[in-house]
Image: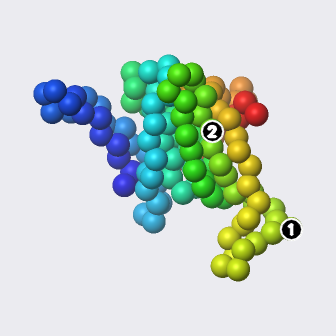
Amino acid sequence: PDVITLWEPLTNGLLATLSQPLEASDGFVFLAFPGDGGTLIAHTSRAVFCFSLLTSHVLWAYQAPEVLAAAADPCSDATLVAVALAMPSAPRSADGRCTSFAILEFDGTSQARSDGAAGAGGGTMGAPRR
């Protein structure tokens, strides 16, 4: 669950293998290609990753208490991510899940924090545009 493989559909040849160490109970649940064509956005239940398709490395990562959903715009570099907010006073549902959330917009390319803070599992911490 911590490996993404990219294949050439016409020849069935392996193009690239992208990997990111994850907790045993976690795995990638979403993949998308933003419109720029050079990156792949993937998310697990607790983090969002932006992989370079040229280098197969993580360009940036963003951790959250819970990643609820994500979507990448095929016509631009925008990626929207819905995350749960970890606030002690946040409203909770009957099953204890947080009901407060935020929608963050990320640059689906190489946007990263300038302070070099470590992201999920290493790499650079992603910074939302808004």
User: Can you say whether 120 is above or below 57 in the image?
Assistant: below
Name the residue at the right extreme.
89
Quick check: 49 above or below 99? above
Residue in view at x 57 percent, y 24 percent: 77
Residue at horizontal 72 percent and vertical 74 percent from the top: 93
- Is any part of residue 50 visible from this angle? yes
Of the pair 120 and 99, the residue shown nearer to us: 99
Pointer 1 and pointer 2: residues touching (CB < 8 Å)? no
Q: How far apart are marks 1 and 2 (CA)?
A: 25 Å
Based on the displayed image, in which of its 4 quarters is residue 16 positioned? top left
Q: Residue at x 44, y 51 (%)?
A: 28
Disc 2: which residue? 80
Q: In this view, does 72 lie to the left or right of 99?
A: left
Q: Mark 1 points at which residue?
A: 89
The x and y percentages for residue 55 are 40, 24
Q: What is the quadrant of the C terminus in the image?
A: top right
Circle 2 sits in a helix, a strand or a loop, which is it?
A: strand
User: Measured from the top left, where is residue 22 in percent x and y?
Assistant: 46, 54
Q: What residue type is labelled 1?
A: Ser
The image's mark for residue 126 is none
| SS for callout 1 | loop
